[in-house]
Image: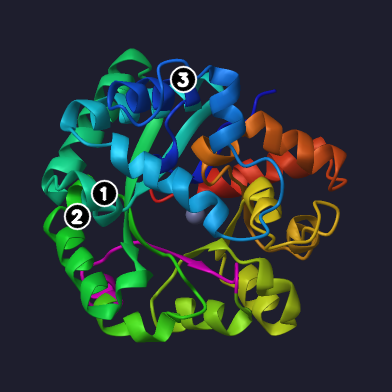
Amino acid sequence: MNRVQTELHRHLDVSLRLSTLLELAQARGLEPQSTSLEAFDKKVILRKPLSDLREVLSTFTLFQRVLDRPEVLERAGFEAVEDCWNEGTRKVELRFSPSFVSEFSKLSWEEVLAGFERGVKRAQAKYPEIQVGLLCIASRDYGPEFAEKTVDFFLKHQSRFVGLDLAGNEENFPCRIFEPAFKKAVKAGARITIHAGEATGPENMWEAIELLGARRIGHGIAAVRDPKLMEYLAKNRICLEMCPTSNWLTRAVPSFESHPLPQVLRAGVPVCINTDDPGVFAVGMADEARICREKMGMTEAEIELCHRHATELSFI
Ligand SMILES: [Zn+2]
C-alpha cells in the first residue's frame, strides 16, 4: 500500500486508550481497583446502536473527570498521536473542545491547549514522519455567546491551531445562530469545518457553508437528500468527513449497508473516512476500512481515493 493514510475527524478529548482511562479512573476512585479491563470495556465502550443518548453520556463525563491536570492532557495527546501512527496514519487532525475539558477540571483553556500540545509535540519527536494539526471546537450547546468566547480564544491562539469547528446539539442549535462568531473567524482567515447534516437535514449543511464559511463538513449524512447540495459540494471541493462506525452507533444511519458514503463518493463529492470518537467506539482506521470494504461494498481504490481527498483537503 503506497497511499498516505490521513484522518481529519478524530476527537482528542475522547480518545484515551481504554487501559489509560481505566488506570486514571481507578487512581481517582471513580472505578473500583478490582475492575478488569474486560469488565470496563463492557461498561464504557459503545458496541450497539444507541437507543438513548443518555447511554453514552456517563462515558463522556468519565473522560471529563479524568482529564483533570496538565500531565494527563499531555499523556492523552502523546498516546493519541502514537495510536494514529500505529494505525498507519501519517497525517491527522485532532480536535478538542476547551470548554468540555475544563468543565470539571477547572483548568484554564490555555492550560488545556498547552497540555495537549506538549503531548502531541513529544509524540512527533518520537515519530517525526507524522503530521499533526489541532482543531478548536466551539460547543453549540451553550449558545452563540459562549461559542463567540471560544472563537475569541481560537483567534488569540490561531497559529497553534489549523482550524475551527462547531459541534454539539444540531437540532436545537442550528448553524445560523452562530453566524456572527464565525464571520469573525472567517475574516481572520480561519479554516472552518462544521458538524452538520448528522442529526438534521441538508439545510443545516447549506447554512454551515453559506453562513459559517465551512470548507469541510463533519458527517454530512444528509447531503444525499439534496441533489443541488451534492453538486455544490463536488464542484467546490467541500469535503465530507464521514465516520461510518459513529454514524451507525448514534443511529445517524440505520445500517452500514445504507451508509451514503459510497454514493456520495461516486457522485464526485470529496469524502473521507474517520473514526470520530475512538475512545467511546473502540475503533481504528483499519476497522473503518474493513467496514467500507465488507459492509459498504467499496473497493480498495475507492478507500484510497478517500485518503487522497483527506490529504488534499487537510487544513495542515
Ligand atoms: Zn465529531
Q: Quadrant of the C terminus?
A: top left
Mark seen at residue 19: 3
Q: CA distance from mark 2 to mark 1?
A: 5 Å
Residue drawn where x is 62% and y is 50% of the image: 246
Where's residue 61, x and y in %? Answer: 38, 47
Circle 1 — which element?
Answer: loop
Q: Which mark is residue 158?
A: 2
Task: Tell me, yes or no, whether the highlighted magenta stretch contains residue 186.
Answer: yes
Q: How many marks can you see?
A: 3
Whether pointer 3 and pointer 1 mark residues with C-beta atoms closer than 8 Å, the reply is no
Q: Which image quarter: residue 233?
A: bottom right
Q: Earlier in the sequence, mark 2 or mark 3?
A: 3
Amino acid type at circle 2 is Gln
Residue 155 in picture, x, y percent from top left: 17, 62
Determine contact: label 2, label 3, CB under 8 Å. Answer: no
Percent position of residue 189, x then y:
26, 66
Report x, y in % for residue 81.
Answer: 40, 27
Which residue was labeled with disc 1?
161
Judge whether residue 184 can be spotted in this image. Answer: yes
Q: Residues within 10 Å of mark 3 (few under 14, many from 20)?
A: some
Q: Is residue 129 visible?
A: no
Give, as a three-letter code, the residue at label 1: Phe
The magenta-colored residue range is 182-199
Residue at 15% over, 66% down: 152
Query: Would you say the residues marked 2 and 1 are in contact, meaning their CB atoms lie under 8 Å apart?
Result: yes
Tell me the element at label 3. helix
Viewport quadrant of the N terminus: top right
| Horizontal relation, residue 206 to residue 118: left or right | right
Q: Residue at x 28, y 79 (%)?
A: 144
Q: Is mark 3 within 8 Å of ligand 1?
A: no
